[in-house]
Structures are given as structure tokens and as C-alpha cells.
Amino acid sequence: MTRTARLGGSLLINVLLTVGLLVAGHVAHSTGLLADAGHNLTDAMAIALALVAIFFAARPATERRSYGNSRMTILAALLNGVVLVGVTVTICVLAVERLLHPQPIHGAVVLVVASLSAAANMIVVLLLSEDHHDLNVRGAAVHALGDALSALVVATAGLIALLASGPVAERVDPIASLIVAAFIVVEGVKVTGASLHVLLEGVPSDIDLAEVRQALCSVEGIEEVHDLHVWSLDSEHRALSAHLVVRGDPSLGATAPLLTEVRALLDERFRIEHATVELETSDADGDDVRHHR
């Protein structure tokens, strides 16, 4: 099964689950099931985002968009994070209202439906785990795993409501929905923060500029590095620009092997595929003679 087919199947499962949980939550008077529906909606958006990334990554760059359209996936991720926060607020309002005005729920319905939701999300996890090298797909799998865990929380609440009575049975469901909301808000903050970091051209979280500078200075012939910048084009592609001061006064042809070594180092060690490097040499009087690459 292709990656696109696995993602498409997972998206269909999550859409059906969202609709089913919304209906079941209304029938069972369960804010927990409604919260689980909201969580599945965020999973569907994460999977849709992965599909969008694949679609736009396949489109060539143009004169108007020389880097291509891959950054649209970051905009979609930012929208996803905003929706996550909005879903959380809605769930919390419903849960607090239910805590203040408790109502009995159908514990059996909540238990069965939430258990089915957990099982369905584990199927999604298994489908997406086959392609663990793709960061977008891996992110969607993590979303699905989190939703399976939150569904188990709701199922536990349904079981307690089925076995208990009185205030415990009436309040366990909104408490479960608040726990699910906590899961969602953590994801929302992470997605929103990571998206804004990329859009603001921040340094990728796993890259240390000092380490990059030290690695470049370790290349034979490079004496100094300045004006060093590293940023992300999207969730997978990175770019770098830097000025490198080289030893002596090499000719244009003599610097070609050095540039090849620099680009190979950046790609292999830091996964930086796009590097714009300017070479500089210093004469005896300290004046800079610049060679653009």
C-alpha cells in the first residue's frame, strides 16, 4: 500500500469517527464523547496536512515561487494549531457547564463507542507506522496515538458511570472531557509554536549555530565563519547562508573542492540541503577580497 493510500484510508477513518462520536455524544449526553470527536477532528486535520505536504512537494518551483509551495504546509499547520485551541475552549466550556449542571449519561453507550474509537485509532497508528521515516506521516501517527489514549480515558469514564451512581456517575464524564482537552491544548500549543517558529525563520530546534560554525571551521582552508544564518523552508527542508573566510588567496577554480566539501558536510551532518555561501580572503593589509558563490 502506498503512502498516499495509507494516509487517505486513515483520513477516512478519522472523518467517520468524528461524525460517529458527535452523534453518539449527543445521544448519550456525553461531553467526553464530544471531546473525543474534537480530538479526532484534529487528527483528521493532521493527516490532511500530511497529504497536502505530499501534493505540494511534488509541484515544481516557478519564477514567482522559486522555493516552490512547500511553506503552505506550515500555514496549514498554523491553522491546525488555532483550530486545536478553539476546540479546546469549546470542550472546556461544555465540561464546566456540565459540572455545574450535571446530567446522567448513558454509560454503556460511552463505554462501547469510546472503546471502538480507541481501536479504530490504533488501526490508524498501525497504518501510518509503516512509513516511520516521513516526518509528516510520523506526526500524524503521533496524533492518532494520542487520540487512542484519550478515547481510553473516555471509555474508563463510561465504565465508572455504568457501575457507579449519584454525583460520581454524573461528573466523571465532564472530568474525562477536561482531561481530553488537556491532551488537545498541549498539541495545539506545540503545533502553533512550531509553525510560528518556521514562519519567523527561526533556527531549527535540533540545530546549534555554534556547532555548525565549529563544523565549518573544521574544514581545511576555512579560518573564520560569520553572518551565519540557518532557517527552515518547511518541516523538512532547511537553508543556510554564511560568509567563510578562507586561508590564502585561492583562485576561483581552487575553491570548488572546498565548496563541495562544505555542502556535503552541511547535508550529511545537519540535513541542510540548500546552502548559499560567500567566500572571503584577507590580504596582508587586512582588506577583504570577496568571491561570491
Image (cartoon, rainbow, N blue to C red):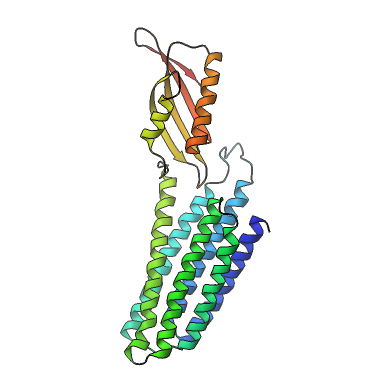
Q: Residue at x 57, y 37 (%)?
A: 66
Decide if residue 104 is in sight here.
no
Decide if residue 215 is in sight here.
yes
Task: Give how far across and how far down residue 212 sits, in percent.
Answer: 41, 33
On screen, 45 above or below 64? below
On screen, 8 above or below 95? above
Farthest top residue?
A: 284
**Image quarter (top left, top right, bottom left or bottom right) of the N terminus:** bottom right
On screen, 176 above or below 200? below
Question: Which one is in front, 138 or 283?
Answer: 138
Task: Give how far across and how far down residue 275 sits, in percent.
Answer: 50, 31
Farthest bottom residue?
A: 165
Q: Quadrant of residue 203?
A: top left
Task: Give how far across and how far down residue 133 sits, in percent.
Answer: 56, 50
Q: Residue at x 46, y 77 (%)?
A: 34
On screen, 234 above or below 225? below
Q: In this rendering, would 54 be left or right of 97?
A: right
Q: Residue at x 52, y 83 (%)?
A: 112
Q: How many marks?
A: 0
Task: Give how far across and how far down residue 138 sits, in percent.
Answer: 53, 56
